[in-house]
Image (cartoon, helix red, strand yellow):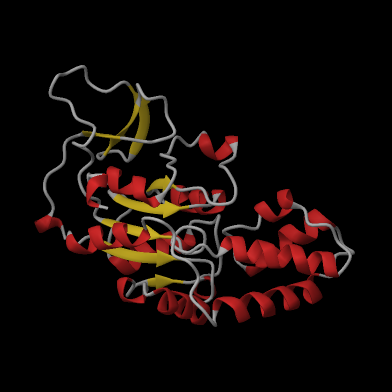
Amino acid sequence: MAARRASRRPVDWILTTRLPTSRVAAFCSTCSTIWFATPPDSPGFSLMELIAPPRAVVFDMDGLLLDSERICMEIFADVCTQHGFAFDRGVYARCIGTNREGTRRVLLEGYGAEFPYEVIEHDWMRRYEARVLAEPVPVKAGALAVLECLDERKIDIALATSTYAPIAARKLELAGLDGYFEIRVTGDQVSRGKPDPEPYLEALRRLGHAADGCWALEDSDNGVKAAHGAGMMVVQVPDLIEPSAEVRALGHPVVDSLLDVLALLGEHKSKC
């Protein structure tokens, strides 16, 4: 990989869509740090002269590539109502991005010991899996464009998802994305799920890369914490829940959609 990568400047200027228009985020490719500053006052400066390609990009799946979190939340809310519990969006938000054990812990803490987790989880997962394993989940805007861009540039790609391997494989297959991910770290392949960094550390190990110069793309706060803890540059594309103040304080780029990630890769949106 190193032989085909162009040398990078110490600081590369990148656009983030959720900053004031007069400011951009600066990413130091030497120390993997992002901070915010005014771009150089130069007639030749262009926001499309952006950061050099990453060594590798590790993707989350649900809520980032696939619009599956919405389906999952709606089914959970319906199952809760059927069992006499009001849906609590705040509690549910803390589940997004975690594995099954993390979800269990959050729901019991949020709803209390009387919450019949095993019963609700059974009905919830039965209905959810019946939906997502039978027909394709919608692919999020820009997902294919980003994957094709990375593939064309021969940039390594991996998946780090809390979903278990058989279900993740079927979702990707139905969505037509399975061919992009030879390396997949799934929720049943790690002992500690997000927000622990283990899924991303394992993805980096399989890729054969150090964290420096590698990106993670995430929608959830738990996923951002995991990737940040692994020492990676994280780009967050929020799905159902906006980033918390705690996570925003990490200083990572937050963009509106995967189409904006093309700008971070230096790809003009006119090519999308």
In-image side of 44 versus 134 (left or right): left
Picture residue at 45% right of the left edge, 60% below the top:
60
Residue 69 picture location, percent across and down: 58, 61
Q: Quadrant of residue 126?
A: bottom right
Image label count: 0
- Single out the residue that lies furthest toward the top: 41
The answer to whether residue 104 of the structure is visible from this angle is no
Quarter holding residue 105: bottom right
Tell me residue 112's x, y (percent).
85, 58
Q: Residue at x 34, y 23 (%)?
A: 37
* For residue 37, above or below residue 171: above
Viewer-closest of 161 and 61: 61
Q: Position of residue 77 (x, y in %)?
A: 75, 62
Left or right: 271 in relation to 166: left
On the rendered image, what quadrant is the N terminus found in?
A: bottom left
Query: Image check: 117 left or right of 10?
Result: right
- Of residues 217 and 266, the one nearer the viewer is 266
* Residue in view at x 25 percent, y 62 percent: 148
Note whether residue 225 is visible: yes
Give the vertical position of 230 relative to 21 (above or below). below
Q: Please state the horizontal and vertical placement of residue 30, each as a whole percent of the image.
A: 25, 39
